[in-house]
Amino acid sequence: MANGSSLKKAKTEMLAAVDIGSSKICTLLANVGEDRIQILGEGIYPAKGIEKGLVADMDLASDSIRQSVNRAQEVSGEVIDWAYVGITGASISSQSGRSMVAVGRRPRLVKHEDVNRGLAAARDLDLPSGEKLLHLIPSRYTLDGQSGVIDPVGMR
């Protein structure tokens, strides 16, 4: 192996996670591979503006999250573009729902735009006063009565 060409480089992905708690905000940045995790940076900052799992002061809470993320970036020397965020509390809930959109009168292939219209319709919920939709997680689609479709794009 003089040139090392037979060595395969393990595929890794940089991931960030932010855990928002009542006492502290923790940010972790890591390279995750098939068989190992390499911690690149961490940022721990007191959770200001969050009491018993509720955001009491949005500005203070936002600043605490920003400080935690900044610390992880400084330690790692990396920039966090996106992160998995975990938050719990009595005010956090989930619900299942459905939306429906017409693809057209004539059979044709489903496009990304059709899926986006369906997701937009699902976001148009009638929520109780003071509640906000944090995110939408599509689980399965139904196309012409066929349920359990994971990705309808390109299907007729």
Image (spheres, rainbow, N blue to C red):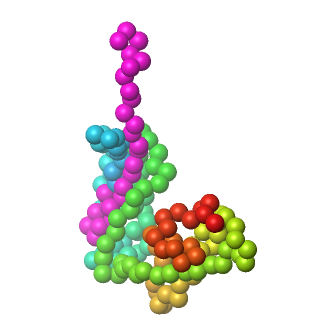
Of 41 and 63, nearer the camera is 41
The residue that appears at 36% across and 72% down in the rendered structure is 49
Q: Quadrant of the C terminus?
A: bottom right
Asked if residue 64 is among those painted magenta in the image, a careful observer would answer no
Q: Quadrant of residue 84?
A: bottom left
Residue placed at 27% from the left, 77% from the top? Answer: 52
- 11 in the magenta segment: yes
Give percent across and percent down for residue 155. 60, 63
Q: Is residue 1 above or below residue 122?
A: above
Q: Position of residue 38 (x, y in %)?
A: 30, 40
Comparing 109 with 73, the one in front is 109
Instruction: Say if residue 16 shows up in the picture.
Output: yes
Can you name the residue that lies furthest to the right here? 106
Q: Which residues are magenta?
A: 1-26
Can you say which quadrant of the picture contains the N terminus? top left
Q: Nearer the viewer, residue 15 or 6?
A: 6
